[in-house]
Each structure stands twice: as C-alpha cells, then as structure tokens.
Image (spheres, rainbow, N blue to C red):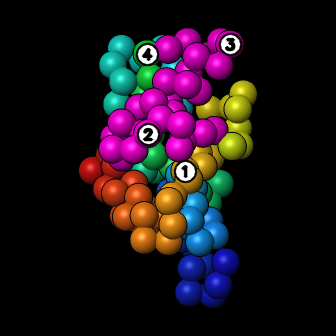
Amino acid sequence: MSDDMTGMAAPAVEREGPANVSIFVKVQPKARKAAIEPARDDGHGRMRLQVKVTAAPEDGKANAAVERLVAEALGIARNRVRVVQGVTDRAKRLGIEGEGFADAEDIAARARGLGA
C-alpha cells in the first residue's frame, strides 16, 4: 500500500490485468433472501461486498449461488464469474472475465455500484 492509502481498506473491486476484474465478497449462506449489500471493511484491510444467498454451504451450492447472483446483477453470463479464492471460506475473491479492456472497465464500474 502506498503512503497515501495508510489506514484505508483496499477496495472491494479491482482490475486484474487487461481484461479481468476481481470482486471481494463476504458470503452469508442460508439467508432468508438473496441480496448484495454495500461493502464493509472486513477488519483485515479489505472492503468486501456482503452477499447473501439462500443456498447451504455444501457441495459448492453456495458458491454457485454467489456466482449466479453476481453475474445476474452485473448483466453478464454466469460462466464469466467464478470463485477463485476462498472456496471453503465465507471471504472470497470472485474472478470475472472481461471480453477485452473496455468490457472489463465497464464490468468494474458496474461492480463498484453493486449493493448501493
């Protein structure tokens, strides 16, 4: 982190390379209703969108529900979103494949508006 970021949490959405986006989330499985809520500091220096899904955290059902919910919220195909870190943890990093630089910029901008 640079000096001007001291004390600030890392953003919930980051660009990863020329055509990819990472979204950092904290998942609440078995919620009453599926929803994406505003990002909060996770206490470890990272902002994470709060994602609630009704699926149970067994056999990958909750992860699949998170991928589906985020893809739908972003208006992109479900197969472009995948859990790339934290498969068995509530804190996850989702990888989103853009179709080039401009598409990834658009996805990142929409992702920053999730939960607002």
Residue highlighted by disc 4: 54
Q: Distance from label 2 to label 3 (Cα)?
A: 22 Å
Q: Distance from label 2 to label 1 (Cα)?
A: 10 Å
* Label 2 neighbour load within 10 Å: few <14, some 14-19, many 20+: few
Q: Residue at left 63%, top 38%?
A: 83
Say how many tags the image has: 4
Vertical side of 106 occupied by 29: above or below: above
Nearer to the camera, 21 or 7: 21
Secondary structure beneath label 3: loop
Span shown in magenta = 55-83
Residue highlighted by disc 1: 96
**Position of 19 compared to 50: left or right?**
right
Marks 1 & 4, CB-CB < 8 Å contact: no
Residue highlighted by disc 3: 59
**Amino acid of disc 2:** Ala
**Amino acid of disc 1:** Ile
Residue 60: image x %, image y %? 65, 19
